[in-house]
């Protein structure tokens, strides 16, 4: 097995160089990575172990599992306490200041790693890693575009998957089957504490108004209290909206897309709110240029909602979400965050999902979600399924 698998070595070297520049700028001498998403970003594959990246020089991959990865930068270990000695044997001095991923390390693991490097000052490297990852390379953008194309193919199939009398979970299963056959990898990586989810969020009717403990734009009661989000077994009946927010991970890089289907005609308020969502997307596509504060995009969206008098239903009804968009890539919920108090500033080649949604009582959820690349001319949409509500009957 090669270390970098399907990712060119030149691409990995570019990412490492970007991280090293950020490491030096922040006054660190090295970072030690152990989070799966960051391991994938810096190696091109997921393994059990650590990536040691010095401020200058060559990264070293300390691997526990799997066996058989061959590369001159790979060192096999049984435990992290071996890393310092192996670095010394290789003539690499220990750093004075080491960065760790404090946003994802548990306390026990953190203490163990700190004790493995006595005399080294530990600092939090999570913000700089997130910032570097938020600006995609050309290779990453192509992976995202390819996911967007295959994601759209799945959504094009949805009207043919529906059968009269279906429940939301039955439709979800058919969508997920079609998605896996299209090549979806299945895993839905989410950044953030206590964020859990399966492949799709299918919300039919008033289940869209069921609050959830998770920080998602839309909720749903779910099938069991152990995973209280999404489809709850609602039978799809006339007058209901069916919101489909399904996994777009076809390449290791995820697009995020939501479309709405209906069982017959929806009421006028729902149709107006859905059109308002599309209007918001068009406005933010023009405004979302490099250098734009993320909070300004949120404020622009709210101004359009207020003009339509739809504030009561925006981003939830019984329980509201505090954002309308987020970064995407290897994970959902990357930077930047499109929220009223966000300090993020859009940068060229950020990739964001915008999801201005509404919940209309006794109808359900409406609105669209698209994935965009931030370009000098605005937001480039890479999820191109039709945005209008599609009648399933």
Image (cartoon, grey):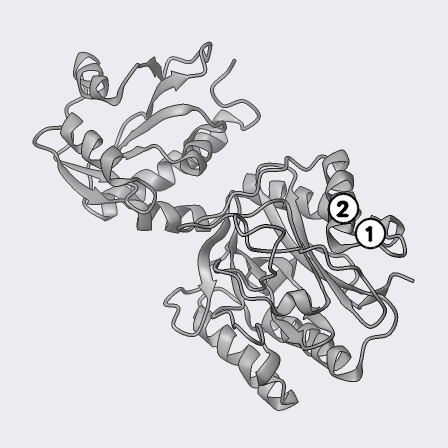
* Mark 1 neighbour class, 10 Å CA radius: few under 14, some 14 to 19, many 20 or more: some
Inspect this view and state whether residue 370 appears: yes
- The vertical placement of 26 against 139, above or below, is below
Could you tell me which residue is drawn at 24 percent across and 48 percent down? 25
> Which numbered circle lies on residue 105?
none
Question: What x and y, as percent, mark residue 262?
Answer: 82, 66
- The vertical placement of 78 against 370, above or below, is above
Horizontally, residue 146 falls left or right of residue 317, namely: right
Query: Disc 2, disc 1: CB below 8 Å?
Result: yes
Which residue lies under the disc numbered 1?
A: 158
Could you tell me which residue is drawn at 54 percent across and 49 percent down? 227
Which residue lies under the disc numbered 2?
A: 175
Q: Counting residues from the N terminus, which is met first, the one under dot 2 or under dot 1?
A: 1
- The vertical placement of 195 against 185, above or below, is below
Could you tell me which residue is drawn at 37 percent across and 19 percent down? 63
Query: Which is nearer the eye, 64 or 69?
Result: 64
Instruction: List the single residue furthest toward the left.
Output: 119
- The vertical placement of 106 against 291, above or below, is above
Horizontally, residue 53 falls left or right of residue 350, namely: left
Inspect this view and state whether residue 292 appears: no
Q: How many marks?
A: 2
Question: What x and y, as percent, mark residue 315?
Answer: 57, 72
Query: Which is nearer the eye, 211 or 281?
Result: 211
Could you tell me which residue is drawn at 49 percent across and 47 percent down? 190
- Disc 1 on helix, strand or loop? helix
What is the CA distance from the residue labelled 2 to the residue labelled 1? 7 Å
């Amino acid at each position: 097995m090669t270390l970098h698998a399907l990712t060119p070595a030149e691409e990995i070297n570019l990412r490492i160089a970007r991280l090293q520049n950020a490491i030096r700028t922040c006054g660190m001498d090295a970072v030690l990575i152990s989070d799966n998403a960051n391991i994938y970003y810096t190696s091109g594959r997921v393994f059990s172990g650590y990536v040691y990246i010095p401020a200058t020089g060559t990264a070293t991959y300390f691997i526990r599992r799997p066996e058989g990865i061959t590369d001159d930068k790979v060192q096999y270990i049984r435990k992290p306490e071996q890393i310092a000695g192996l670095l010394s044997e290789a003539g690499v001095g220990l750093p004075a200041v080491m960065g760790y991923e404090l946003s994802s390390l548990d306390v026990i693991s953190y203490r163990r790693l700190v004790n493995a490097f006595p005399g080294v000052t530990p600092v939090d490297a999570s913000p700089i890693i997130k910032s570097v990852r938020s600006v995609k390379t050309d290779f990453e953008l192509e992976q995202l575009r390819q996911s967007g194309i295959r994601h759209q193919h799945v959504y094009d199939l949805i009207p043919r998957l529906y059968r009269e009398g279906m429940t939301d979970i039955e439709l979800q299963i058919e969508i997920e089957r079609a998605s896996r056959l299209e090549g979806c990898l299945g895993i839905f990586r989410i950044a953030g504490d206590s964020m859990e989810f399966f492949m799709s969020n299918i919300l039919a009717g008033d289940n869209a108004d069921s609050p959830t403990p998770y920080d998602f734009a839309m909720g749903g009661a779910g099938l069991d209290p152990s995973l209280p989000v999404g489809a709850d077994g609602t039978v799809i009946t006339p007058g209901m909206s069916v919101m489909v927010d399904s996994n777009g991970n076809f390449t290791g890089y995820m697009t995020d897309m939501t479309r709405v289907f209906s069982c017959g005609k929806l009421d006028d308020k729902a149709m107006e709110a859905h059109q308002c969502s599309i209007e918001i997307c068009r406005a933010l596509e023009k405004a979302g240029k490099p250098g734009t504060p993320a909070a300004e995009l949120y404020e622009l969206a709210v101004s359009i909602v207020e003009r339509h008098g739809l504030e009561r239903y925006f981003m939830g009804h019984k329980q509201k979400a505090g954002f309308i968009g987020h970064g995407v890539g290897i994970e959902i919920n990357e930077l930047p965050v499109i929220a009223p108090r966000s300090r993020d500033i859009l940068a060229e080649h950020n990739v964001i999902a915008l999801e201005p949604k509404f919940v209309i009582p006794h109808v359900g959820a409406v609105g669209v979600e698209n994935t965009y690349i931030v370009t000098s001319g605005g937001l480039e949409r890479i999820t191109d399924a039709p945005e209008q509500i599609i009648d399933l009957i």
